[in-house]
Image: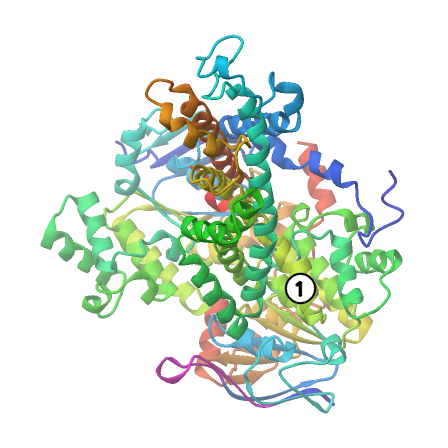
Amino acid sequence: MDMTKADLTGARRPSLLHRFLTLPFWSALRREPLGFAGVIVLALLVLVALSAPLLAPYDPNRQVLDSSLLSPSSSHWAGTDEFGRDIFSRLVWGARLTLRTVFSVSAIVGPIGLIIGVVAGYFGGRVDAVLMRLTDIVLSFPSLVLALAFAAAIGPGLNTAIVAISLTSWPPIARLARAEALVVRNSDYVSAARMYDASNLRLLTLYIAPMCIPSVVVRLTLNMATITLTAASLGFLGLGAQPPAPEWGAMISAGRKYMIDYWWVAVMPGLAILLTSLAFNVVGDTLRDILDPRHERG
Amino acid sequence: MNVIEVRGLDVSYGKNESTNHVVRSLDFDVRAGETLGIVGESGCGKSTVLRCLAGLESGWGGSIHVDGKPVSWRRTRDELRRMQLVFQDPFGSLHPRHRIGRTIAEPLRCMGQEASDQTVRAALIQVGLPAEFAHRFPHELSGGQRQRVAIARALILAPEILLLDEPTSALDVSVQAEVLNLLADKKAEEKLTYVLVSHDLSVISHMCDRILVMKDGIFVDEFAPGVIATGAAHHNYARHLIEASFF
Amino acid sequence: MNAAEPTLDIRNLRVTYARGIVAAVDGIDLQLAGGRLGIVGESGSGKSTVGRAIMRLLSSSARVEADRMMFAGMDLARLGERALRQLRGKQMALIMQDPRYSLNPVLTIGAQVAEAAHLHLGLRGKAAQQAGAEMLARVRIQNVARVTGLYPHQISGGMGQRVMIAMMLIARPRLVIADEPTSALDVSVRAEVLELLDSLVREQGSSLILISHDIRMVAAFCDEVAVMYRGRVVEKLAQLENAAHPYTRGLLAALPDPKHPVARLATLDRALLSQLETSR
């Protein structure tokens, strides 16, 4: 591509995909074995969720009562539950529910937190005071309790869980984005932009917000572990996805009655939750190490 | 003719007991076509004066007239265009995620003017950089090259007055010479007026027609650069500064 | 040890970084027996790397090689980390650019100087505090009693650098390496701090290596100036007037001098320099 002739003002650039694949991020990731493992686990999880109909050996909701509570074997890798449903198939389908919750919440919370934080940090003064007091109020609610109340008020279900978790998990993101914006707004290149009369909207969207995105992404990834756990907790309490949906938390809840004699019924979904939230945590930590040089390890 | 007239400029931060009176009722003029130097040590208020002129500070007292018209804390687009500022730190004054070409085109776009490739190319060549640099990011450039980009960005709006805040103190001596030469060339070509702030008397005396010595928010002395060689400054502090700079 | 033997004797010092192809320091000889040596260079010339290589303070990704690396009769290249730790502070000291980052922000000045006295002189309690206070008085801090109770953020840069000098010189080290000791300070206190450092070093009979980008300042204070460019010493000078290498001459010409005003500053002929580099 001849780039020297045209396009000096930077209007056209290499394709997004190309830029994504050539990010120094990927070579940095190779030097972090643990983080690399975390990324692989998450990638597998997404793959499993996408191809659930192909991977699951049985229908997750088909009850075969004469084969109930079978222990793990070659025909039922994770055993069967009290209704004779194949637990492995249910876990595979459950990955869809978990990931849908996690990614929906992140997609709601990330932009909201970023916008509130950046606006508060950039304008300061009264705007900052109002937005941050609002943040403090939401932050002072225990998130699970608020989610419980919300789910109880408008009826349980997966979407309720998503909205309820979103309601309580934006404040930390907003605070983080505000702190970043406070630093960036005083930098020289923003002052220079003020000198050529860049509008507030332009400064916010093109000068300040992009610099806050890396740390917000890190925080979101770390948050995903918490969201996984909160979603499972809501499921466990019967306020998330409703039976017979193979929600991991709900599966543990159902399995706890049989836990003493048939451990796999509760342990298998527990392992799935553990693995998922661990992977999110590890990837979040690694992202922070790569994206934020201030946290560099010695 | 005076392009800038400052009367009773006063800046203080904080309130009540912890008031920090940075600039104390300054009067000074900047004449058309001259280079005015303000020299002083850290915390004397010299950068604050420059930021007040640039319109980056609010809450100052007194009056500033540019071309005979008073300006306030908030500037109009035309008032901003007339005066541009070059910052000290070439690492912090360029948007780290924008390519050089975009950095230089931004002022024109924000001011609602045409920003063609031709303009950007000319602006880069004008400050002694190859036009291909438009595709690079700031972190791919050296400190001196970045400062050239910052100068190109300031000049692209065709300002009449260029405010320079320690433009070379983050640079190596050999690069400093190149940047100072560039500034001198641009001044001659574009008939600019400079206000140069620095802690470095040798830079100030090389560049300036008139030197103001600032200490604790006031000007304590004013002299021509020739005075430095003869050591005939009036004020004790100015003499001390000259001695300390060239022992 | 006989008098002719230098305190520091370094032959063909090379420093390379794991991922770098070019050597940061590329074959440097230094001999120092008392007296003051200046190392001058621009950013990236490797001047700071030399100081840290002598102190063996470089990170593990740096490879340090030398034909000879002797300090006070000891082979620096062979000493273990424990012996080096003994050496640093007691026998050689490093004074860095910005006292704000070298002082512990949560301890008072007095406590930090007393800590240095404890570490290097083996003094405890009152005796350490006493020795610290005396040292502070020696770096010409007025009203020592008040200053010992202050925290680093409450004192000026010049005073902070004097406190650093007090801490570093309390053990009477044989070699003091000062890396840009004044460039974070205001012009009017620079000379003071340098003179202080100079007189203390003379008093104690230590050797001083002064590393800086400011060739005029270094030349004014040092017996000999080594000019570094791209990891090599291009020239050693006793006086700036004798500069012969085009880099040194270019550097001097690029400095604005109010006593000899010029319309345009001379700039380095980088093409000529890289030609010289390749023809080596």
How far across and down, in percent of the image, does residue A14 sit? Answer: 79, 41
Predominant SS along the magenta part: strand
How far across and down, in percent of the image, does residue B77 sit? Answer: 75, 77
Above or below residue C42? Residue B103 is below
How far across and down, in percent of the image, does residue A193 sit? Answer: 68, 66
In screen coordinates, is B219 left or right of A27?
left
Q: What element carries label 1?
A: helix
Q: Which residue lies furthest to the front in this view?
A: A66
Q: Does the magenta stretch include residue B9?
A: yes
Q: Which residue lies furthest to the top in this view?
A: A74
How far across and down, in percent of the image, does residue B213 sit? Answer: 53, 80
Residue B59 can be seen, yes or no: yes
- The residue nearer to you, when weighing B238 against B29, is B29
- The residue nearer to you, when weighing C234 against B24, is B24
In screen coordinates, is C270 left or right of A121?
right
Residue B172 can be seen, yes or no: no
Taking the spot 43% from the left edge, 39% from the top edge, the residue there is A233
Above or below residue A209? Residue C71 is above
The residue wearing badge 1 is: A203
Q: Is residue A63 magenta?
A: no
Taking the spot 79% from the left edge, 60% from the top edge, the residue there is B105
Which quarter of the rendering shows the N terminus of chain C?
Answer: top left
Q: How crowded is mark 1: few (under 14 residues within 10 Å), some or many (20 or more)?
A: some
How is this picture coloured?
rainbow
Residue B57 in which image quadrant: bottom right
Taking the spot 59% from the left edge, 25% from the top edge, the residue there is A44
Magenta segment boundaries in residue numbering: B7-23
Which quarter of the rendering shows the C terminus of chain C?
Answer: top right
Taking the spot 86% from the left edge, 45% from the top edge, the residue there is A4
Q: Which amino acid does label 1 sit on?
A: Leu
Q: Which chain carries label 1?
A: A
